[in-house]
Image (cartoon, grey):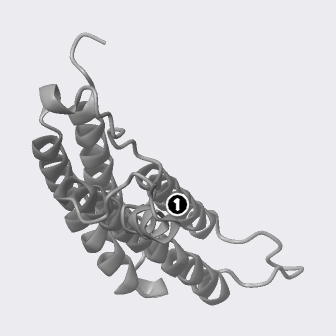
Amino acid sequence: MIDPIKHTLTNLLTAYGYNLYENKNRLRADDLLVREKAAEMLSEGATTLRGLRTAFQKRFIPPPTRENPSPPPERLAQLREMAQLMERLEDLATRIRSMAVPTQDRVWEHFRGERALLSQLLQQDYNLVAPCHELRDAVQRLTPADWNDATASSLQTTADRVEQAIRSRTDFLRVPGW
């Protein structure tokens, strides 16, 4: 007969079948941590953009008056650009958080080299961090006076690099022929 205390302790240490101390399980946890950090950077960038947009609006869009009832159209276009970039960053952060990770499949574990796959997957995730970091830092350095077409284009290009890293990771996990 199995001692119930020993049985409970064994279950706790192996997390009811999920051994936290195995290298492959640490790789899964690292994968999640790296992706969360990348998504967090994009969320911080979106939050900074929200504040920048508010400051831009206060500084460059005067309240309507009888003589000037409509705000300057070029400034409204810049506000829309900021809002679109902010939404894009939020969308990219959501996509990163919801990325797939290979399930723990003991039957096929021998055939697919799960540890190697997870190590390569972690490298794919690290490739996400650099453009996310660059994008967040670029947004955080901006002031309302800095916003122009070149700035918007540069930020969109960096966001394109994040999107490419997301696609690359998705393609990496795709099983050929499926």
> Residue 160, relative to residue 130: is it above or below?
above
Residue furthest to the right in view is 66
Number of marks in the rendered image: 1
> Which residue: 42% across, 68% down?
6
> Which residue: 37% across, 68% down?
13
Task: Say left or right for 90 vs 114.
Answer: right
Which residue is identified by label 1? 90
> Which residue: 34% across, 61% down?
35
> Which residue: 51% across, 75% down?
49
Q: Where is residue 113 in the image (x, y as percent from the top left)?
A: 12, 35
Residue furthest to the top in view is 177
58 vs 74, nearest the viewer: 58
Residue furthest to the front in view is 1
Picture quadrant of residue 41: bottom left
Q: Position of residue 102 (x, y in %)?
A: 32, 39
151 vs 37, nearest the viewer: 37
> Residue 52, relative to residue 101: is it above or below?
below
Q: Position of residue 146 (x, y in %)?
A: 39, 82
Q: What residue type is labelled 1?
A: Glu
